[in-house]
Image (tube, grey):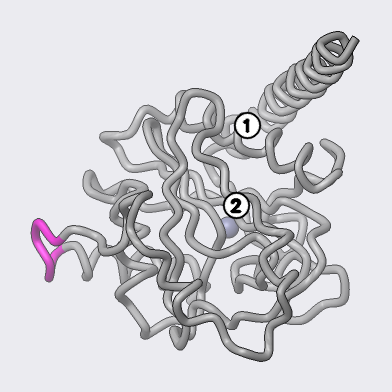
């Protein structure tokens, strides 16, 4: 069984067993459990490569990190080279971003972990960007998806507006590319790292190029805005 199928089944079981259960630590204003538990061995620049956006496009980003000690958070610092795009493959009506966040925070039976979960109205930030997450299925391949990718899961539950989810993911991807000085060519699909059709719906509907164009448009707009802001700041100093 592949890890994501296992994750999807685990989430379904989790939802069935915990009706109405709310995810923990999902409030932007709540104390950050990761910071509280930061190992002493990490240097002060540990958090430098971890963007904490409050929004991407018009969508709020909620930082809700998997706690230290969970197998889903190996806590290894690494270099960021790619974004890795996935879909959850879980069409259950409750399998939204909040439910996946809750699974990541509370289920310790699996080591699968990723950095962002996106649905049609909210984005959960589940692992700091500068830490490894096991989601690409390529073990410890040098310059591979696990070691160097920021894993992004798009929700495909039937009550979710998939079109909006794709747009939200493109907006998040563009923001991450600009932040970490990457290019659109550094956005990879899960299937680029292993033999698996993921993100399944995007690929099977022949929409990969359309998705890349969305990212390109958002990325160009962000850079244009940056230039405008720089010019504006320069003018204000005169
Ligand atoms: Zn995947």
Q: Nearer the viewer, residue 9 or 172?
A: 172
- Is the shortest distance between ligand 1 and the CB of mark 2 under 8 Å? yes
Query: In the structure shown, which secondary structural element does the residue marked by tag 2 occupy?
Result: loop
Q: Could you tell me residue 133's position as x and y percent?
A: 61, 71
Q: Residues within 10 Å of mark 1 (few under 14, many from 20)?
A: many
- 192, above or below 168, in the image: below
The number of numbered badges drawn on the structure is 2
Q: Nearer the viewer, residue 225 or 169?
A: 225
- 200, above or below 190, in the image: above
Residue 209 as seen in the image, left or right of residue 28: right
Residue 210 as seen in the image, left or right of residue 178: left
- Give the number of the mark in front: 1 or 2: 1
Q: Nearer the viewer, residue 162 or 26?
A: 26
Location of residue 210 (image quadrant)? top right
- 214, above or below 56, in the image: above
- 169, above or below 219, in the image: below
Which mark identifies residue 226? none
Q: Which residue is mark 1?
A: 170
In the image, the segment drawn in magenta is 16-21
Extreme left residue here? 19
Q: Which residue is mark 2?
A: 198
Lower sequence index among marks 1 and 2: 1
């Amino acid at each position: 069984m592949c890890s994501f199928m296992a994750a999807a089944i685990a989430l379904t079981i989790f939802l069935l067993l915990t009706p109405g259960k709310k995810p923990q630590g999902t409030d932007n204003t709540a104390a950050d459990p990761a910071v509280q538990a930061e190992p002493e061995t990490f240097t002060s620049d540990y958090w430098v490569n971890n963007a904490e956006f409050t929004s991407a496009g018009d969508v709020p980003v909620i930082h809700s990190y998997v706690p230290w000690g969970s197998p889903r958070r190996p806590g290894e610092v690494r270099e960021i080279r790619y974004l890795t795009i996935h879909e959850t493959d879980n069409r259950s009506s409750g399998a939204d971003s909040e439910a996946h966040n809750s699974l990541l925070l509370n289920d310790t039976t699996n080591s699968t972990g990723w950095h962002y979960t996106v649905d049609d109205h909210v984005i959960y930030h589940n692992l700091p960007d500068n830490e490894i997450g096991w989601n690409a299925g390529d073990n410890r391949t040098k310059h591979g998806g696990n070691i160097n990718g920021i894993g992004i899961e798009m929700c495909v539950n039937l009550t979710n507006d998939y079109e909006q989810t794709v747009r939200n993911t493109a907006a998040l991807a563009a923001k991450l590319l600009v932040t970490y000085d990457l290019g659109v060519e550094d956005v990879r699909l899960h299937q680029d790292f292993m033999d698996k059709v993921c993100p399944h719906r995007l690929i099977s509907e022949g929409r990969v190029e359309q998705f890349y164009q969305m990212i390109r448009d958002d990325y160009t707009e962000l850079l244009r805005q940056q230039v405008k802001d720089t010019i504006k700041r320069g003018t204000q100093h005169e």
